[in-house]
Image (cartoon, rainbow, N blue to C red):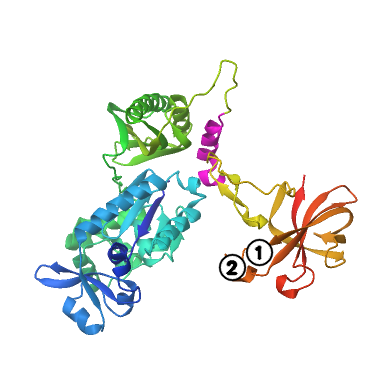
């Protein structure tokens, strides 16, 4: 079952203008409208949230908008620049989210996420991550995923807050109560249906088709079928000449998995040859299958490092051929390096007797494409004296930096994500506990070493200006070694609450 994401940018034109103007842009709370010509009239073509909350709407005459809202900022719209920016945004989404992405003018994107959501932790995490990226850039966004483009488009605009996942097969229940404006109909058709008393999609879907088609034409029935998922609506994916792409057309459609695998290997050879000419290596490749019914199927594979390895790329793509539904046949196959980086050749062995350095990038690629890129990481040191801030997650093949952990005192092999409260008996201020209770089990301390004093990072948080921790390494009667600390110096209340915590376990 296909899964389609609709990304709705309700104030795309005004948000884009604000980013372009930078510091010269009016404050977000100032009502802002963009004006353009509609035949001989000057009307509102776009408005920000403040203008809409003030009662303005798209299509309103510009003179009326200025009369209604005091202090309204009016600027000229640039629909051509908005459309061009939306195309660039679609290319950005193509490189990060799914192989099939297209602009959905004037204020959205459509993404066929079939088989790609697991790379981002699932549909819910994919949508929230997508929306948060836009929020961080100053662009308000809403997103929904459903079984069809029409249903996702309607839910993103009328239901998402700010994201919504419609379960497979449940789109009819979700959209029947939506207004008929959600069907992407011509405004004249929507106005005519409202005159007849139709307000929701459910009311329209329950009526006989013939009289409605006779009065409003075939578009109404087609949109109803598309939103219900009864009629396919192909997405024409965005592409740019800068992408390295190869394709193969077939005189007779193909469908057998072994045939698809054979031509996949041939396309990989062509793609690697094209990448070699440009000195590039592929980081993400998309294999698109153009079916005879004008729909698309796709496979996306990513790599941890830039590669031009024929066997590796072929294996990553052919391992997922069973997920492809050829339908009545595939007439075109195209392979695109949607993300490529310069590839620097490295010498594997420096001498005749040298041992080659182990290369685990192939294993990382296989695991990443199976369970998701975000689930693969390694830990790297960060310059911080606070233990929980001294480590971060990085991509598996990220080069090592110059940072390292302090070596004055040993660190536990297992650091808990958050320090856990323990009950202790200790003599303040400098003595370790005689015993402590952790997770309901009391442990008597046989040996201890410390304290190691760690100061708060006052330049990050004012609350840490006087904060300190005293860390101890302790060993219980069973020989287990733990890393515990007291919050505070044991004497002054402003340094901490003098409670004890367990922060790590030595192996």
Q: Main secondary structure of the magenta part?
A: helix
Residue furthest to the front: 408
Which label's residue is closer to the chain start, 2 or 1? 1
Residue 273 picture location, percent across and down: 34, 25
The magenta segment: 359-375
Image point 51% across, 35% down: which residue? 365
Distance in Å between CA atoms under marks 2 and 1: 8 Å
Is residue 55 found inside the magenta-colored segment of the image? no
Work out whether 55 lies above or below 343: below
Is residue 368 found inside the magenta-colored segment of the image? yes
Check the picture and name the quadrant holding the C terminus: top right
Residue 288 picture location, percent across and down: 35, 37
Which residue is the site of mark 2?
461
Using residue 192 as the reference point, say whether residue 274 is left or right of it: right
- Residue toward you, 19 or 252: 19
Using residue 319 as the reference point, say whether residue 105 is left or right of it: left
Q: Quadrant of residue 152?
A: bottom left
Work out whether 255 lies above or below 74: above
Neighbour tally class for label 1: few under 14, some 14-19, many 20 plus, Cα within 10 Å: some
Image point 31% across, 34% down: which residue? 245
> Could you tell me if residue 332 is visible in this image?
no
- Residue toward you, 396 or 286: 396
* Count of numbered circles in the view: 2
Work out whether 32 lies above or below 327: below
- Residue toward you, 185 or 465: 465
Which residue is the site of mark 1?
456
């Amino acid at each position: 079952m296909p899964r389609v994401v609709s990304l709705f940018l309700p104030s795309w034109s005004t948000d884009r203008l604000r980013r372009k103007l930078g510091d010269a842009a009016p404050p977000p709370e100032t009502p802002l409208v963009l004006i353009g010509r509609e035949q001989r009239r000057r009307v509102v073509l776009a408005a920000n949230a403040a203008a809409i909350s003030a009662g303005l709407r798209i299509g309103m005459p510009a003179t009326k908008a200025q009369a209604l809202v005091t202090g309204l900022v009016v600027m000229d719209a640039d629909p051509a620049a908005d459309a061009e920016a939306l195309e660039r945004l679609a290319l950005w989404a193509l490189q990060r989210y799914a192989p099939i992405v297209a602009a959905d003018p004037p204020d959205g994107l459509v993404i066929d996420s079939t088989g790609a959501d697991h790379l981002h932790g699932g549909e819910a995490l994919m949508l929230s991550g997508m929306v948060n990226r836009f929020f961080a850039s100053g662009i308000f966004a809403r997103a929904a995923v459903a079984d069809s483009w029409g249903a996702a488009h309607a839910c993103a605009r009328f239901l998402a807050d700010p994201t919504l996942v419609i379960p497979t097969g449940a789109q009819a229940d979700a959209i029947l109560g939506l207004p008929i404006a959600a069907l992407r109909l011509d405004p004249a058709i929507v106005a005519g249906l409202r005159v007849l008393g139709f307000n929701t999609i459910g009311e329209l879907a329950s009526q006989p088709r013939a009289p409605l088609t006779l009065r409003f034409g075939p578009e109404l029935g087609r949109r109803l079928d598309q939103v219900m998922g009864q009629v396919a609506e192909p997405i024409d994916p965005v592409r740019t000449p800068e992408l390295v792409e190869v394709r193969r057309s077939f005189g007779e459609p193909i469908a057998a998995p072994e045939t698809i695998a054979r031509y996949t290997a041939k396309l990989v050879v062509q793609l690697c040859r094209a990448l070699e000419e440009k000195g590039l290596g592929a980081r993400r490749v998309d294999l698109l299958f153009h079916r005879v019914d004008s729909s698309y199927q796709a496979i996306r594979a990513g790599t941890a490092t830039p590669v031009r390895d024929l066997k590796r790329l072929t294996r990553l793509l052919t391992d997922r051929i069973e997920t492809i539904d050829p339908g009545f046949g595939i007439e075109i196959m195209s392979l695109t390096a949607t993300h490529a980086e310069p590839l620097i050749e490295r010498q594997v062995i420096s001498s005749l007797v040298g041992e080659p350095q182990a290369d685990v990038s192939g294993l990382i690629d296989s695991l990443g494409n199976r369970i998701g890129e975000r689930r693969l990481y390694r830990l790297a040191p960060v310059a911080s004296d606070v233990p929980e801030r001294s480590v971060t997650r990085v991509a598996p093949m990220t080069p090592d930096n110059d940072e390292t952990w302090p070596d004055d005192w040993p660190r536990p092999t297992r650091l808990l994500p958050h320090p856990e409260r323990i009950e202790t008996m200790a003599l303040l201020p400098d003595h370790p506990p005689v015993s402590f209770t952790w997770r309901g089990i009391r442990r008597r301390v046989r040996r201890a070493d410390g304290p190691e004093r760690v100061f708060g990072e006052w330049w990050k948080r004012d609350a840490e200006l006087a904060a300190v921790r005293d860390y101890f390494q302790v060993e219980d009667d069973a020989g287990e070694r733990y890393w515990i600390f007291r919050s505070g110096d044991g004497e002054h209340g402003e340094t901490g609450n003098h409670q004890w915590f367990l922060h790590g376990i030595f192996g």
